Image (cartoon, helix red, strand yellow):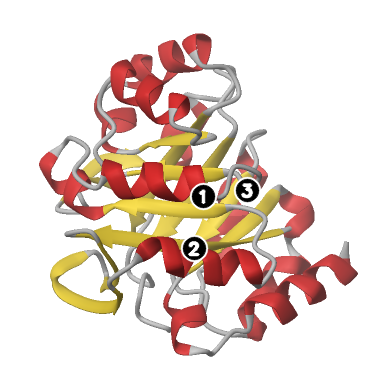
Amino acid sequence: MLLIPAIDLKDGQCVRLRQGRMEDTTVFASNPVEVAQRWVDAGARRLHLVDLNGAFEGKPVNGDVVRAVAARFPNVPVQIGGGIRDAATVAAYLDAGVQYCIIGTKAVQEPQFVIDLCKQFPGHIIVGIDAKNGMVATDGWAEVSAVSAIELAKQFEQAGVSAIVYTDIARDGMMKGVNVEETAKLAASIKIPVVASGGVTNMDDITALCAVEDQGIMGAILGRSIYEGTIDLAAAQAYVDQQS
């Protein structure tokens, strides 16, 4: 199982939000490239970047920072989400060295868009499903749809999506523990590998995810926990490797 550090970008800085609220922001660093270096030095095998401004504006805003991170670490896969609404944006990110583009809002609004992207950019498309009480949220989590997370994920089973990043909004940034039950339920319902996100707080969460890894959970995104020190990334990844 991969442990993937999150670098959330707002106004060019590395921040963390609580439950996706832009007004509830903690700034962790002014230089996201240096933050990425910290996690790569700790053994990160993939980086998860989110353009928070982009998610709300519907277009890339922190693209320069994303490109700088990808250029600095050509051997570490970078996945980026937030504001990706057209094929040209995906092409630009991939050309810059990004490995995976995460489609969230538009996956809900226009599932065919994801299917088309998978054909155009095979092996490079991830779907981000952000849910509240099992229902999908969009537009930077500002809107909750009438579509369930499992229902949405099943639409992409034959499309060639590389993974589903599943975020429980109620847990995100709150340090209250990951929603293992819902994550495992989703993973067991589909053939696409699932990456857990939201609320991973300490080693108990890592242990719980390892216990259901065989359901189809390929990784977990770590945010506030590694910034505040409740999880040591290097030690946690070493533990996970021993369980495999």
Mark 3 or 2, nearer chain start: 2
> Alpha-carbon neighbours of circle 1 within 10 Å: few (<14), some, or many (≥20)?
some
Q: Quadrant of the N terminus?
A: bottom right
Picture quarter containing residue 241? bottom right
Amino acid at circle 1: Arg
Confirm or deny contact between disc 3 and disc 2 (CB under 8 A): no
Q: Which residue is mark 1?
A: 72
Amino acid at circle 2: Ala
Q: Is residue 158 visible?
A: yes
Give the label on residue 186, or none: none
Picture quarter containing residue 85? top left
Q: Element under label 3?
A: loop
* Residue 93 image point, x, y percent: 39, 30
Seen at 66% across and 84% down, the residue is 203
Q: In this picture, is 97 found above or below 64?
A: above
Confirm or deny contact between disc 1 and disc 2 (CB under 8 A): yes
Q: Quadrant of the C terminus?
A: bottom right
Q: Which residue is mark 3?
A: 76
> Alpha-carbon neighbours of circle 3 within 10 Å: few (<14), some, or many (≥20)?
some
* Residue 59 image point, x, y percent: 18, 35
* Residue 32 image point, x, y percent: 37, 63
Amino acid at circle 3: Val
Q: Is residue 136 visible?
A: no
Q: Which residue is mark 2?
A: 36
Picture quarter containing residue 4? bottom right
